Amino acid sequence: MNNRRSGFYLSLLLLPVVLTAFLGFHPLQSEAADTLPAQLPDAEFWRLVTEFSEPNGAFPYENFVSNEREYQNVLTELTQKGPVGGVYLGVAPEQNFTYIAALKPRMAFIIDIRRQNMIELLMYKALFEMSKDRSDFVTRLFSRKCPATVNGKSGAKELFQACGGSAPDSALFETTLQAIKDRLIKEHKFQLTADDESRIKYVFNVFYTGGPQMDYMFASPSHPNASNVPNYYDLMIAADSQGTRWSYLDKEDAYQRVRTMQQKNLIVPIVGDFGGPKALRAIGQYLKDHGSTVSVFYISNVEDYLQSKWQSYRANIAALPTEPTSMFIRVFIDMPRTFTAPMNALPASYPGRSFQ
């Protein structure tokens, strides 16, 4: 083979290396077989929660419930063209359950800067585990008894119209609150602090007092884009731009898919800053060790808060094992707009609203 042809083939071989270095993107770095667990023991689940987490951080709003009315609009695209399986990463509260139900990952990590969000997700975990169906779940979540006539074929609209019409039940609240704590502390043996237990009561009381009509502004400081925010009921009955309803509470099989993952300890809440030194890197190393990749990262609008940490955030994303099909889900709150973008196209500096 002549030298010119040898040089040409060598250039082809080196091209992926050059692109990787240029983009700061690192696709799957382990060729080991995917060994993600089918179920996590309680002790291993709690080890991941505690060892991967960073110290509690601050956020100016409570974020008990999503304010993203358009959040379902990317799901038709992702379910038809996006990555299959793999690991889901997300942020914030209940919208993750709808994404998980639709995208069917093998495992999920939900990372949020505030420990209170981790506590809320543990509250949800206990409620999922204890509730055999959606009616049972909504009864417990809002401390309002659902009529026995609600069945598995009812959509979210029928479910909430039935359950939401019931008065808040203080006895049910107290019974369920104790059951949540017993489930987490006595059965799972998670080492919650006294403050964690107080936070469970605080968060659960918000759902009790607010009911299905609670929205992003309920029991939270004012937000500059607070007008016309959806409430919990609105989010659960919403459809995408094509009329498809993806909510985790709209169909029984969607609810059961999330419930099964919760029962198997496969939805892991982590306290972490996306630009921080530990959480994302620990998750990335765990996935590499198990030969797996991130399929979807629901990032919401967190990047708007990371301008001063952009380089560390970019490095953390680059450390995650991904595929060419791995996608971000981004949100522009004030437009509103939800859209996807390849994870390997993160710009070198914060681009503002010129992402897409």
Image (cartoon, rainbow, N blue to C red):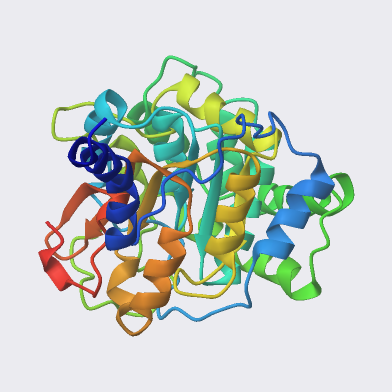
- Residue farthest toward the front in the current orientation of the protein: 2
Q: Residue furthest top?
A: 153
Residue 194's quadrant in the figure? bottom right
Percent x, y of residue 204: 60, 59
Residue nearest the viewer, comparing 34 with 116: 34
Position of residue 99 measured from the top left corner of the image (x, y, whole percent)? 40, 39
User: In the visual, does 188 lie left or right of 115?
Assistant: right
State whether residue 144 appears in this view.
Answer: no
List x then y, in percent, for residue 294.
46, 44
Rendered position, 267 above or below 308: above
Residue positioned 24% across, 55% down in the render: 345
Q: Quadrant of residue 348?
A: bottom left
Instruction: Depth check: give the residue in front, 54 or 229.
Output: 54
The C terminus appears in which quarter of the rendering? bottom left
Residue found at the very far bottom of the displayed protein: 308
> Residue sitting at 47 percent across and 43 percent down?
28
Counting every numbered tag in the picture gives: 0
Q: Return the x and y of residue 88 as percentages of the image width and height.
A: 47, 43
Residue 295 seen in the figure: yes
Residue pictured at 63% horizontal, 78% vertical: 55
Q: Is 23 situated above or below 262?
A: below
Please state if 184 lies on the left or on the right of 141 as rendered. right
Q: Residue at x 23, y 49 (%)?
A: 341
| Image quadrant in which the N terminus is located | top left
